């Protein structure tokens, strides 16, 4: 079943605004939302990066039906997986079945802050596998001692647990990580409509598990205004390749973003008022086999985007999904 969700961009909004945006997303008709978990924003111009677990408590109280997940948490370096396990259990209990934990191997941007070594991807992949194993053991609610290659826990027990099992969605940007997501996760999170990722996920344990795809846009009254906002605020996220995992500071992303042109961004990210551009972009996700598409509206005008979604985009998407079911 195809569902549409909303991206809560912690890098762009104050905590109270994120709580309000979640409530307004629910009212606008979105069925789920993912919230980013960062220590730093990607660029100083984005301006924010609140502690996600505090914000989630507010969202739990401001919504009643919206499913919410982290998109995504890195339970490897700056925060021990045992702490993430407790935070997740508490949050899931607050949401009463509406919360899931999204995890990934992280970025140097956030994970270097305590002076720890930034490991290569293969090591981070192994760390994530072990971290998820440890968290699942702790969620059994038993007194737990764990001694792995990367993490140690002695005589730990999580007392406050939700009634329903905690779901773990795993982020992937390549076939290898998508296979890992199929093996250790309850679902896949990705940021591009790439069928090869979904195929790798499905073929390695992910059959019948949900897939989530983030679609970045900038609705605006004009294409020019949307392009300007997208490039100014989200240009750092147009940095290609592995740089997004390796650069340590927002100013480095800003320097690299000088090589990113507005035209290169709008080739894959819809901007402006034309609903057909957004429908075409969503269709790419559905054709890739992603059934849960969540939309990241870049910039301060979230209210305008909610009106656009409710009045124009949602009816068009309903027509799209009725006419052509998502690929599997």
Image (spheres, helix red, strand yellow):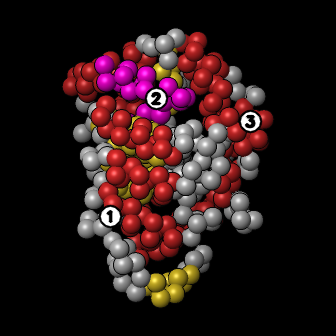
Residue in the picture at 43% in, 85% down: 144
- Identify the residue at the far front of this view: 16
- Where residue 125 sits, quadrant-wise, is bottom right
177 displayed left or right of 305? right
Say which element carries label 2: helix
Could you tell me residue 206's position as x and y percent? 35, 54
Badge 2 density bin: few <14, some 14–19, many ≥20, Cα 10 Å: some
Q: Which residue is mark 2?
A: 302
Say which element carries label 3: helix
Label 1 vs 2, first from the N-terminus: 1
Q: CA distance from mark 1 to mark 3?
A: 39 Å
Residue contact at pointers 1 and 2, CB within 8 angstroms: no
Nearest the camera: 307 or 134? 307
Q: Determine if residue 176 is in view.
A: no
Badge 3 density bin: few <14, some 14–19, many ≥20, Cα 10 Å: many
Residue in the picture at 48% in, 21% down: 219
Residue contact at pointers 2 and 3, CB within 8 angstroms: no
Whether the magenta-drawn stretch holds residue 84 is answered as no
Which numbered disc covers residue 254? 3
163 displayed left or right of 295? left
Q: Which residue is mark 1?
A: 93
Disc number lying in front (2 or 3): 2
User: Which stretch did the figure color magenta?
Assistant: 291-311
- Where residue 212 sits, quadrant-wise, is top left
Label 1 vs 3, first from the N-terminus: 1
């Amino acid at each position: 079943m195809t569902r549409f969700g909303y991206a809560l961009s912690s890098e762009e909004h104050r905590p109270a605004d994120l709580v309000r945006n979640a409530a307004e997303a629910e009212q606008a008709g979105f069925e789920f939302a993912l919230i980013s978990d960062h220590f730093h924003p990607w660029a100083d111009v984005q301006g924010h990066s609140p502690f996600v677990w505090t914000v989630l408590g507010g969202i739990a109280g401001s919504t009643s039906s919206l499913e919410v997940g982290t998109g995504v948490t890195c339970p490897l370096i700056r925060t021990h997986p045992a702490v993430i396990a407790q935070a997740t259990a508490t949050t899931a209990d607050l949401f009463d079945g509406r919360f899931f934990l999204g995890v990934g191997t992280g970025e140097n941007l956030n994970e270097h802050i305590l002076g720890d070594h930034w490991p290569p991807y293969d090591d981070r992949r192994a760390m994530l596998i072990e971290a998820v194993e440890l968290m699942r053991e702790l969620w059994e609610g038993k007194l737990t001692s764990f001694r792995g290659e990367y993490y140690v826990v002695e005589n730990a027990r999580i007392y406050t647990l939700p009634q329903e099992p905690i779901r773990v969605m795993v982020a992937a940007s390549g076939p290898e990580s998508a296979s890992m997501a199929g093996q250790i996760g309850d679902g896949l999170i990705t940021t591009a409509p790439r069928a090869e990722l979904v195929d790798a996920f499905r073929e390695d344990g992910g059959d019948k598990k949900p897939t989530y795809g983030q679609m970045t846009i900038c609705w605006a009254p004009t294409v020019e205004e949307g392009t300007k906002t997208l490039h100014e605020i989200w240009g750092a996220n147009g940095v290609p390749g592995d740089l997004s995992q390796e650069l340590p500071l927002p100013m480095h992303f800003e320097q690299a973003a000088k090589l990113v042109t507005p035209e290169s961004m709008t080739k894959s990210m819809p901007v402006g008022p034309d609903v057909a551009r957004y429908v075409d972009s969503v269709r790419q996700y559905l054709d890739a086999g992603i059934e849960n598409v969540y939309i990241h509206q870049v910039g301060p005008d979230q209210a305008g985007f909610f009106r656009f979604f409710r009045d124009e985009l949602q009816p068009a998407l309903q027509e799209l999904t009725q006419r052509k079911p998502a690929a599997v």
